[in-house]
Amino acid sequence: MAGNKKIRGATKTNSLGITFKSQLEKSLYKTLLELGFHPQYEPRTFVVWEGFTSVTPFYDKETDSQRDKRDPRSSKILVEKSSIVQPIRYTPDIYFEYNGIDVWIEVKGIENDIFYIKKKLFRKYLDEVRTTTGKKSLYFEVYTKKQLLQAIEIAKGYGQE
């Protein structure tokens, strides 16, 4: 599967044997290590919406790979597309467990156009896990080290009310 092409301004970097998609992800991961946590980077991809096989024919413009290469002047025409609608997948950036609670951290720079949908679907998934198994989770969207430190304090106090 191809990586997310909508990440802008991020610089891939290798550290600790891990290829991080951004400098911020690397920095926050290292901060968690320094504070004694055992984070995992992109440990799991979740299917947050199941795909399906459609019975309704779907037509869209042809792609360059479908076009007749012999006639470069040919305009794109409507062609029938696959009846398989792929599932929506989501991979949180960082995970660790703290006092029996799953802590998921999404490190954000610039949001792409699909993230807000995946975020809602992932939150629904976490709610379903809690109602069916009782397993508690916290989900944070952080943009800075300061917000990460605040998230850690929230996690430490969670359930102690």
Image: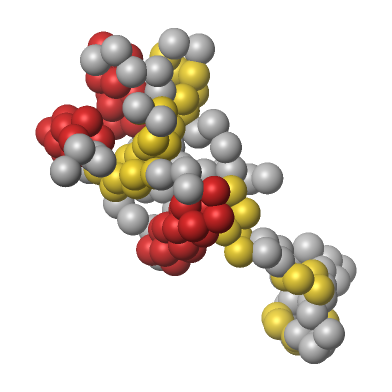
Q: Quadrant of residue 22?
A: top left
**Residue 107 visible, this orientation:** yes
Quadrant where the N terminus sits is top right
Residue 12 at x, y percent in the picture: 43, 29
Q: Is residue 94 left or right of residue 44?
A: left
From the top left corner, tell me how far across and down residue 130 is, in percent.
47, 52
**Taking the image as drawn, is residue 23 in sight?**
no
Q: Which colour assignment does the render follow?
A: secondary structure
Residue at the image position 54 percent from the left and 31 percent from the top: 43
The residue that appears at 29% across and 12% down in the rendered structure is: 36
Could you say where residue 27 lies in the image, as x and y percent from the top left?
28, 23
122 vs 23: above or below: below
Image quarter of residue 70: bottom right
Q: Compared to 29, does 60 lie above or below? A: below
Pinpoint residue 45: horizontal percent, then vertical percent. 59, 43
Residue at the location (25% across, 35% down)? Answer: 155
**Number of marks:** 0
Q: Quadrant of residue 39?
A: top left
Q: Is residue 44 above or below residue 20?
A: below
Closer to the camera in the image, 56 or 92: 92
> Would residue 118 appear left or right of 77 to someone viewing this image?
left
**Which quadrant, please, contains the C terminus?**
top left
Q: Is residue 75 above or below residue 146?
A: below
The reply, left or right, for residue 85 in relation to residue 43 is right
